[in-house]
Image (spheres, grey):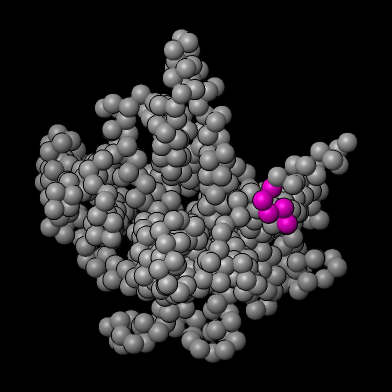
Amino acid sequence: MATTRTRSLLARIPNPRLFCAGALIMLAVITLIVIGMVWMPYEPTAMSPDRLQGVSAAHLLGTDKMGRDILSRVMYGSRITFLVALGTMAIGAGFGILVGAVTGYYGGIVDEVVMRVTDGLFAFPTVLLALVIVSLFGSSTLNVMWALGIAFVPSFIRVARSEVIRCKHLDYVKNARLMGVRDARVIFVHILPNVSGVIMSNVMIGFNNAVLSEAGLSYLGIGSQPPYASLGQMISEAQEIFFTVPSAVLGPGMVIVLMVLGFSLMGEGLRAAEGRMA
Amino acid sequence: MRYVLKKTATTLATLLVVSLLLFVAFQLISGDPATHILGTGATPERLAALRAELGLDQPLPARYLMWLTAFARGDAGVSYVYHQSVSSLLSAKVPVTFALAAMSFVLMCAIGLPMGIACAKHAGSPIDRAVMVANQIIMAIPPFFAGILISWAFGMGLHLFTPGGYVSYETSVPRFLGYLVFPAVAIALPRAAQLAKLLRGSLLEEAGKNYARTAYSRGNNTNGVLYGHLLKNAFLPALTFLGMSLGTMLAGSLVVERVFNIPGISSILLASIGNRDYPVVLATVMLIAVFIIFVNLLVDILYKVLDPRIDEE
């Protein structure tokens, strides 16, 4: 039973091979993170005299210049990056969808003001906006998450707003309103579930951008503070020992790439096939 | 013309909103500039005198106007930490960052546009599929990681340049540009991949429309339809993307400058964020914001030139 159900679900995916490749990559990354929560080969901050070791059975990704095990640090760092990206999406999508849906539904002067502010903020690159926020409130992992989350709000306001405006004159919404359904219920129970596909694909893209932005910020030394490093910071520290221990850079770098690639391949697999030139 | 005027008005409104938001945010958070400059041990009389000198005894709207007019004249105040004017601190560094961003932008177009057109033309072929998968991977590589890999491969492996051997544009412009090529590639690659994907998709969408079929039926070959009919329409979404890219490239420069040891605004911006040197941070961010907002205006006008149908909604 389960297999036929899975098969019929997979059959509906336009490009199941891409989708499965992405899902497998994502599964591998999440497994690495989950294992890291329960067990790591070494304590990620524990220093040892075995400095700058190459790849070996004892240290699968070698050790850094303080003799810390790189695999353990990658496991810990990918957890930070992943959680920050998840939190960023929760904040950005949460606030953005709420504000966008409500202002789009009611319109008027509030909508106009919100759109001006959104346009202004939207002009900023995410990293820059996050830098401003971090510079005002200080640099910690939690602040980076809030900063990135706020930086992502405008894009979700735009999507939710335009989708709600598109739907609010459709028959099923008019019908619901004629039947006396309250506005809040129209917005959140009638309209939003109908546009969830568009919003979900934006969440997936947003997650990837969040991972890349967090990596960039932590490479610049903003976010989690040493000795607990996130992936970008590990790369920044390991840059000078790249030639002695390449895995110190390649390890965390590959995890970032895979984390982004997994979701983007899944998203690609879900997109309908395109035509071709005649 | 009415369209241009209207867009210019919205641009100015956006500019005002952004500058007001930034100013108020930095005013509320940063605390008293006089204490920052004189230190906490200063006497109340000296603090009051400096406040009057800086115009801090004025109400907030008046201070905003003073700051805005001064900024428009190129005066962005005095750094708390370096005790010299912000404009003198930034003037040597801003051209470097903008040159890097501009070069990344040119490279992105030079790689992304032909690749997108070629992939659309041969859509479905093994080469197209291979390029699309490669693009997906390239998009997942953060520019700073690409930068490290590039400086390893081209700098240490092939000895095409010396990582860290930055040459100032005052010494030699060709060598300055030569050094910037490698970081520019690192910044441009993921955006070029996105651009190629976007243009390919948009071309294929246009190719499915009736006017494309008509163009074929009138005896055009694939190239004739592609370049004569589809490209102009398919380019519109790409134009929006290009406009947004300039901002992304500036942000990318901030990160990649550190990989290649380039003395652009990245180092001073980050140091100022760490030191809570608010005038420097505010001026840098404002400068980038003004640039991006004007680029958006340019994109809007170009859009109108390419597609005269968009008018006052």
**Residue B5 lies in the magenta-colored region:** no
On the rendered image, what quadrant is the C terminus of chain B found in?
top left
Q: Relative to A76, is B158 on the left or the right?
A: left
Tell me the chief SS of the magenta region: loop
**Residue A16 lies in the magenta-colored region:** yes
Which residue corresponds to the image point at 44% horizontal and 83% vertical from the top-left?
B165
Residue B182 visible, this angle: yes
**Residue B195 vertical placement versus B15 (above, below):** below
Q: Relative to A59, is A180 on the left or the right?
A: left
Q: Position of residue B129 (x, y in %)?
A: 63, 68
Q: Position of residue A166 (x, y in %)?
A: 42, 33
- Locate residue A69: give its quadrant: bottom right
Q: Position of residue B9 (x, y in %)?
A: 17, 46
Q: Relative to B126, is A168 on the left or the right?
A: left
B125 vs B9, nearest the viewer: B125
Which residue corresponds to the image point at 19% horizontal and 38% vertical from the top-left?
B44
Query: Which stretch appears magenta?
Result: A13-17
B76 vs B232, nearest the viewer: B232
Q: Position of residue A64 (x, y in %)?
A: 69, 67
Which residue corresponds to the image point at 28% horizontal and 71% vertical from the top-left?
B95
Residue A262 visible, this angle: no
Which residue corresponds to the image point at 42% horizontal and 62% vertical from the top-left?
B214
Farthest residue, direction top: A180
Number of marks present in the image shown:
0
Farthest residue, direction right: A1
A111 vs B206, nearest the viewer: B206
**Residue B161 vertical placement versus B148 (above, below):** below
